[in-house]
């Protein structure tokens, strides 16, 4: 079985993204020292929501890649369309995260919107390129931010900040 260069590039990107996902909680990076990524403090439920969305994005990229190889425009459109919308469950999270994170999230969803729009008429190589570009957005976010547990009671405070 032969694979195209864009597919192999995309597969490598998925593997790198999955490795970044595995490091999300620990903050470990290859170089010794402190993790330079900006920490975003979220509650356990918020962290679970973010993780769920990231997993949906990775799975969606894999589905779109497979569909592009098979020439399945309907699956490409349906998958990308679902990923561009989200489930609306992240409203509270959007209020807590930095502007840069919100912009990256919006840009990622716009990338999926573009893939959805091009699914009907674009050549499969263009769809694969757009999918790879979207995956690069995932990698950029993982390289910039990390999600850590929100402290229930920061040092020096008698009551938790959220109540």
Image: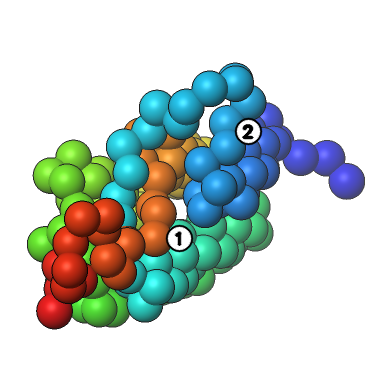
**Left or right of 19 in this view: 135:** left
Residue 32 visible in the picture: yes
Distance in Å between CA atoms under marks 1 and 2: 19 Å
Tell me where residue 119 appears, x and y as whole percent: 39, 58
Image coords of residue 124 (percent x, y): 51, 46
Is residue 10 placed above or below 58 in the rendered structure? above
Q: Residue 61: x and y, percent?
A: 52, 55
Look at the numbered disc 1 and give the secondary structure of its residue.
helix
Residue drawn where x is 25% and y is 78% of the image = 89
| Count of marks placed on residues | 2
Q: Secondary structure at mark 2?
A: helix
Say if 97 sits above or below 63 in the image.
above
Q: Check residue 54 in the rendering and tell me which mark sits there, or answer none.
A: 1
Q: Which residue is at a point 52% across and 53% down the rendered structure image?
A: 25
The residue shown at (11%, 62%) is 95
First in sequence: mark 1 vs mark 2: 2
Residue 160 shown left or right of residue 127 in the figure: left
Q: Relative to the observer, which residue lies in front, 2 or 141?
A: 141
Q: In terms of image quadrants, where is residue 41? A: bottom left
Label 1: how many Cα within 10 Å (few below 14, some 14–19, many 20+):
some
Badge 2: how crowded within 10 Å, few (<14), some, or many (20+)?
some
Q: In the image as oriented, which residue stretches furthest toward the right?
A: 1
Q: Which residue is mark 2?
A: 9
Mark 1 or 2: the one toward you: 1
Q: Is residue 131 left or right of residue 90?
A: right
Report x, y in % for residue 62.
59, 57
Quadrant position of residue 92: bottom left
Residue ID at (67%, 30%): 5
Residue 118 in sight here: no
Identify the image quadrant of the C terminus: bottom left
């Amino acid at each position: 079985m032969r694979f195209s260069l864009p597919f192999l590039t995309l597969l490598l990107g998925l593997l790198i993204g999955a490795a970044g996902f595995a490091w999300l909680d620990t903050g470990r990076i290859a170089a010794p020292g402190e993790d330079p990524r900006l920490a975003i403090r979220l509650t356990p439920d918020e962290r679970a929501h973010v993780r769920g969305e990231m997993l949906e994005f990775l799975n969606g990229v894999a589905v779109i890649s497979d569909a592009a190889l098979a020439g399945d425009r309907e699956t490409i459109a349906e998958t990308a369309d679902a990923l561009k919308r989200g489930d609306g469950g992240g409203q509270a999270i959007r209020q807590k995260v930095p502007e840069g994170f919100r912009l990256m999230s919006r840009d990622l969803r716009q990338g999926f919107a573009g893939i959805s729009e091009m699914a009907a008429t674009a050549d499969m190589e263009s769809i694969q390129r757009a999918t790879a570009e979207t995956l690069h957005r995932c990698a950029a976010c993982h390289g910039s931010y990390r999600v850590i547990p929100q402290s229930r009671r920061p040092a020096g405070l008698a009551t938790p900040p959220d109540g």
